[in-house]
Amino acid sequence: MNAEKREGTQSIQRVINLLRVVARNNELGLTLSQIARSTGLHVSTAHRMLSILVEEGFVSYDRGSRLYHLGIELFLLGGSAHQFSIRNLFRSCLEKIANETGDTVFLLIRSGNDVLCIDRVEGKFPIRTIPIDIGARRPLGIGAGGLALIAFWPKAQFEEMLAANALRYPQYKNLTVSDIRNLASQARKNGYVVSQGLFHEGVTSIGIPVENSKGEVIAAITVSSIAQRMDGRRRQEIVQLVKRTARVETLGAFHPF
C-alpha cells in the first residue's frame, strides 16, 4: 500500500473511531478535549474532523454547552438500514400468511412517534383491501398495526406516547386520547387489536404485535380483509397463524428506532 492510500485508510479509521467515541457518550455529550483524549488525536485534528462531521450532519455541536452529540444524519441512515433488515427478515413470513389467509398482510414498525408501513403482501382473495400504502406514516396508536405497536407497552411509556400524539389523533375520525386508551385496553384483553371499519368502511383489520426473545415489541403485522371474512373464529385462527409464523423470524431481531 502506498503512502497516499495508507494515509487515506488511517483517516477513515480515525473518523470511525471518533464517531464510536461520541456514540458511547451520546447521552451526556463530550467536549472537544474529551474526544481528542479518548481517540488519541491531537486537538486540532479532532476539531477538523468534527467540523466536517458537523457540517455533514453526522455530529451535532451545542455552542452553549460546547458538547458534541451524534447528528440526525446518522439516525436517518440507521433508520433506513433498520427498515431494510426488518423487511428482509419478515418477507417470507408475510408471504406465508398472505398465502394461507388469502388476505392482504402489512408489516409496520415504529419510527419516532409514528407508525411506518415498510412492506405489504397481497393475498389471492379476489376482493382486496389496501388500507395503507408502503411508506405511509400515521401517529402511533392509529390503525390496527399502529395501536398494536404501543398497546402492550408499560403504562408510563404508553401514556407518554399518547400525550405526544394527542393533538394529531383528531385528524383521524375525530379520535381522542381516551378513544385510543380504550381501544388499547380491549387489545390487551384480547392479545391483539381489532379495527372494524374504524378507518375504512367495510374493512376489518387485525393487528398483532411481534416480540423478540426479550419480550420487546419490534414490529406489528396487520391482516386486512372485508368484514364478512373476519368473524370471531377466523380472527383467532389468523392471530395464531401470525404468531406461529412470526415466532421463527424474530429470533435475534432487535428493537426499533
Image (cartoon, rainbow, N blue to C red):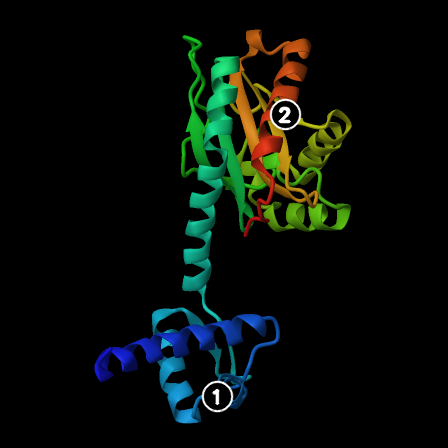
Where is residue 27 drawn, in percent x and y?
Answer: 61, 71
Q: Which residue is mark 1?
A: 40
Occupied quadrant, residue 170: top right
User: Relative to 158, does residue 191 appear above or below in the rendering?
Assistant: above
Q: Nearer the viewer, residue 247 or 62?
A: 247
Along the viewing direction, whichever of 89 and 147 lies nearer the viewer: 89
**Res 2 → quadrant:** bottom left
What number is the disc on residue 244?
2
In space, the residues marked 2 and 1 are separated at their CA atoms by: 50 Å
Q: Which comes sooner in the sequence, label 2 or label 1? A: 1
Question: What is the secondary structure assignment of the residue under circle 2?
Answer: helix
* Number of residues whose C-alpha sits closer than 10 Å to that of mark 2, classed few (under 14), some (14–19) or many (20 or more): few
Q: Looking at the image, which is closer to me, 41 or 142?
A: 41
Rendering coords of residue 195 (x, y %):
61, 23
State whether residue 165 appears in this view.
yes
Residue 73 placement: quadrant: bottom left
Three-letter amino acid code of the residue under disc 2: Arg
**Picture coordinates of residue 63 (x, y %)?**
48, 83
